[in-house]
Amino acid sequence: MRAIRADRRPLRLLGWCACGLALGAAAGVCAVAVATAVASGRSTSADRDPAGLIDVGHLPPLLRLAGEKVTLRFNVFCPARGDDPFGGAPCDAGGDVFVRAGGSDAFRQLPLRRTDDVADGRYAADVPADLAAAPEGFSYYAVLRNEATGASVTVPSGGAAAPQLSLLLDPAVEVDLGRHAFGSTRHADSRVADAAWGSAPGEVGLEHGPSFGPIGPSSFDVASNGEVSVLDQVNKRVERWRAGRTSGVVPVAVTGGIADMAVERDGSVDVLEPTSAGPTPELRSFDSSGKLQSKTPIDDRTWSQLRAGPQGPEVQQEPSEQWMPAQRGRSWLTRSAQGRGGHPGRALANGNELVVYRAGTSEARIAEVSGGRVKRSWRVTSATPLGEIQLAEPLGSRVVVVVRPYTETQDEFLVLVLGPRGVERSFSVDSADWAETAPLARFRLAGSSLYQLGSTPSGTHVDRFDLEVNR
Amino acid sequence: MSLLRPRVVFLAAFLVALSLVAAKAALGAFVSQCNYNAPTPSPNMYRDGSVTVALVARFEGYHWGGGCWNDNDVDEGPNEPLQTVSSGGEGGDCSGLTFKVWRESLNTGDGGHYQWGKLRNVHGPYSAASFKAGDGVPNATYSKVDATVMDAFASSTHIGMIYQRSTSGADQIIEAKCEACGTNIFTRTYRADSSYGGVRRMGWTG
């Protein structure tokens, strides 16, 4: 009898197990059904009202040549009129541009006309010749409307308080690069940071999936003492190197998306995140130990780069296409205060600003501007298409510029040291861009050395190129 | 005390089953709101009108293999596992978003325009690599220098559509980028990156 009982025990346990699995699964299905119903009701009721949807695309002519006809063009993205707002037809938009000579006269109102040119902007206004020729340039802002719903958007976001500035480049130092010769790249003077992909200290994280990537460390910065900080957002930390060796790891609370980073003089770390809980991206500031100090939403929907300015971090934002301060003194600025502080160039320590404009397909225009006037400028033309301007930064009396010549199948970075008479020094650098970074975060200038954040399938590195010029 | 007591076994089995069903459903809950309606043939396909279609997907998350979203600006399937299986969360992936915004057909030989509702769960037949190669009648490779609003840049693993060129020479791109990035407008440097090629959807009305 006892033997029979012992034989049945496993069967009984199996029965209890099957019973538990069945009832657990049934309870799970019920719970999910309830949760789905709740979620369904919540999401359906919370759909955005299409009437409020409006956005703008605009490329401001920041730096112009004398005699160029100036037409300001805008695309307005909003739902179409009628029963099918997302049927693919353009919306019924309109608006006005407010233009004035320089920065002090009253604005003139120019109604936008609708055109068939979506590539450059369906809505256009010609700037009157007297304003276009004004030696102090002209400033403007635009108010775009969905005529069907009344929804509107102002660009730049600061409106009349911080209009966009368009300056005449002349007289500019002309630089003709000719056709770029790919394949003659310079080797770095030193590799100052080197890390394999991974999550251990001294390694840097890599994100890679079947429909994206690879994405490596998204930004870096270099202190005046040569210490390199790399934003390892995949592992949510900043890693530091000094004299080629790892010198510290600082955990930071970041989202893990592609972010830009700037390290301030006191060692605090600013990280410009791709997203936030609100409608615009967020600037997070950490002290040197990684403790979160602040979260500040930026004013516009999109950013392109973050730099430490003389009065705190500044962010180049779109669609305004302006640099906007995020901090004044110890105070972080609201979105509207950032918009009111917008200006076309990156703020420099001497109080001037450096304006950069990649015109057409193969031209770069750079100007140092003081009090709304061009102090010195360069017009760089190339027979090879130019991609983005990765870096433009003063180096004493010169300006260092890194541009990216490209064809359909090749690309390299071209480093130019521009002086009063043209190119004083130039060399090409391998793009070393196996893994993606933030868009304009591949180069930093510290002292008289240029640093590049690069990557290969085996890891990431920071290379130093000495520019061999005096500051 | 033995762990093989009936009540312990029952409880353990109950909890295992409950958590497995809940975990699977938590990821798949969003897709249960989606539909499989037929697309509507669309007479017009303007570039700026299609940008507006793409804007509906903004903030709705990223989901590998996905193509279904609502318009409440909340990712209702966040923190999904990293692209190993299609787990039923909200949002498109890069090629799914492009397929829907470009109003393409499931039939790669059909170059017509088809409107897919935002809650229509469809990814389409193209991967980023096949878009890059210009596969399918509606798609063609295109010069990167000349690429403009609603053309795209594609690599072997990713595709994003041009929203607006920026003063730096980079482009604002609307794309479903990654789980941590979501679907949004980002500044990117794909145009000059030799791992990317230009792609054009053919047949725009204007």
Image (cartoon, rainbow, N blue to C red):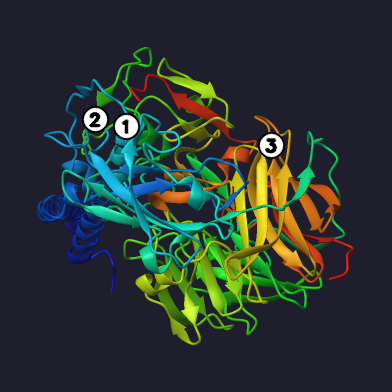
Disc 2: which residue: B116
The residue under the point 43% across, 47% down is: A58
**Given this view, does label 2 or label 3 mark the residue nearer the observer?**
3
**Is there CB contact under 8 Å for labels 1 and 2?**
yes
Figure check: A453 above or below A324: above
Q: Amino acid at mark 1?
A: Lys
Helix, strand or loop at disc 2?
loop
The mark found on residue B137 in the picture is: none
**Is there CB contact under 8 Å for labels 2 and 3?**
no
A19 relative position to A308: left or right: left
Disc 3: which residue: A406
Helix, strand or loop at disc 1?
helix
| Neighbours of disc 2 within 10 Å: few (<14), some (14-19), many (20+) | many
Measured as percent of width and height from the top left, residue A131 is found at 49, 52
Q: Quadrant of residue A373?
A: bottom right
Q: Amino acid at mark 2?
A: Trp
A244 relative position to B98: left or right: right
Looking at the image, which residue sits at the far bottom? Answer: A330
The residue under the point 66% across, 58% down is: A367
Q: Nearer the viewer, residue A111 or A234?
A: A111
The residue marked by circle 2 belongs to what chain? B
Measured as percent of width and height from the top left, residue A318 is found at 45, 55
**Is there CB contact under 8 Å for labels 3 and 1?**
no
Image quadrant for the N terminus of chain A? bottom left
The mark found on residue B100 in the picture is: 1
Measured as percent of width and height from the top left, residue A106 is found at 39, 64
Distance (Cα) linking label 2 and label 3: 36 Å
